[in-house]
Image (spheres, rainbow, N blue to C red):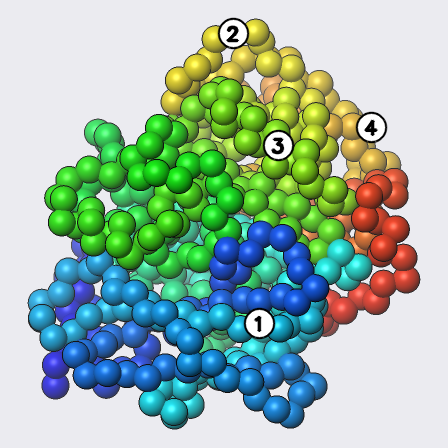
Amino acid sequence: MILLLLAVFATFAAVSSPLVFAESEVFVVKPYLQLGNSAQLKKSEQLEIVWGNVTTKAPQKWSIEWQGASEKTWRKTDKVTTTPMPIPSLTTTLVFSLTRATIDGLKPGTKFNYRVLKNNEIVFESHGMARKSAKQAYRFAVVGDIGAGSPGQTAVVNQMELQKPDFLVIPGDIVYNSGRVAEYLVRFFPILNSDTSAANRGAPLIRSTLTMGVIGNHDIALTNAWEGTDFSTFRDALGYYLFFFQPLNGPNKIANSPNSTRIVGNADNQKSFIDSAGQRFPCMANYSFDYGNSHWLVLDGNSYMDWSDPKLRQWVDDDLARSKATWKFACFHQPAFSVDEVHSNEQRMRLLVDIFERRGVDVVFAGHAHCYQRTFPIQFKQDNKNLGGLSVGEVPGKIIVDKNFDGKTRTTPQGIIHIVTGGGGAKLYNKAPFSSIEPWLEKYVYAHCFTICDINGTTLKLSQIGTDGNLVDQFKITKSVTVGAADMKGAADTRPKTAPLKK
């Protein structure tokens, strides 16, 4: 039997033996849902189904069938795209590839079934849900620093699946330690797309739940002397640009352009990566998308980004200004406000807070710090200093704190609430010694946990949930009727029943 051998280096220690995939195996990566290049909501929605498989020179015929949950007829497409993945192989006859197909004509907010066929034989079946419209209530999950391959990760994923989110956002450090394709095959897909649910295994989450990625520092093969992602050392680096299929409305379109992930090293390996990533590199590091009555701005917070650059700031401002959504969220890996012992001085994302405040961002989500943190509603007035080219360092300014907001009876904040939800499974971080003197910090939880948000019209309820299913934090935000909110009157709550929260 012909085998494909992939050398994999684990997060905390090298794996002594390579991964082995038999030619007879149908999937290396089981099917999962992606949004594709579809930023705005449409009357007729579409999603992409992606899977990884081992291919030989012998032709394989793939197709997809899908139907609405209440329909009897299956629709079919054999219009699939297969892209070789840049992974070193010990055989010339096998290639690891990603294959994807688009299912369209979906009514917003409706469930559908789908199945994958290989050579006209059904080899996989699951279900999903089209993006919801502005008239529907919805639930989403947010958790970062998730790909550690740890007991904390499997427990978080298992509990998260019980909450039945409509979509998941991962704010960076998707897989440790280096964001390599081989690491995704060990520390991401087997746990977030496990065939069965268990606290020590994970759950079949991403095959049915739309998942959005955000690039972090461990997603770029970061080294102590990082001057670009080195394709001589890490041939299968930057898996983020290969496994995710997301909107291409970001500002950077050209490889190795300023303010983008830089690649160096072996020229052939670079070319192989670029051929596989296509337009997603480097464009997909920054993008925006809509879901329900919310608009999401996803940003690259890594140190090569200069967010004092006027052109980048204008892109952020224009994107948020165009949106008439009731709720606006910003999401990136490195938090603007954190009191953890490791990353508290990395404050460069504060450079954008003035735009967030002016354009009505409600909540900012980040990871990076392996814990949970919540600020009071705050406003930030940056000192007028030249901070151009800032990589890692403090951004001085005045922080105005709204302590009238309690999230229970007084639920209209004066300022933005900043959430750090980096408890996805990596080693936890303690508070820094100075943290007790920060008046803007409302909550700090040293635990593996994740964020669940429920939005129904002009009300948002955020619940932070631990690996045991217990609540570790909860608050509510309400706002007056704004553009789009009137459409929510009388809307049915179509969210699925979920596991009860323990208080």
Residue identified by numbered label 4: 404
Asked if residue 466 lies left or right of residue 453, the reply is left
Between discs 4 and 1, the one toward the N terminus: 1
Q: Is residue 78 above or below residue 384?
A: below
Q: Position of residue 465 (x, y in %)?
A: 62, 54
Comes first in the chain, label 1 or label 2:
1
Q: Give SS at disc 2.
A: loop
Give SS at disc 3: helix
Q: Nearer the viewer, residue 197 or 278?
A: 278
Residue receiving disc 2: 385
Q: Amino acid at mark 4?
A: Asn
Residue 98 spot, x, y in % from top left: 33, 67
Badge 3 is on which residue?
A: 318
Spatial CA distance of label 3 from label 2 is: 24 Å
- Estimate how packed mark 4 is, as few (under 14), some (14 to 19) or many (20 or more) residues with alpha carbons within 10 Å: some
Image location of residue 436, percent across then percent down: 59, 23
What residue type is disc 2 on? Lys
Drawn side of residue 361 relative to residue 352, left or right? right
Q: Residue at x 20, y 47 (%)?
A: 270
Q: Pick whichever, 399 or 3, lies toward us.
A: 3
Disc 1: which residue: 104
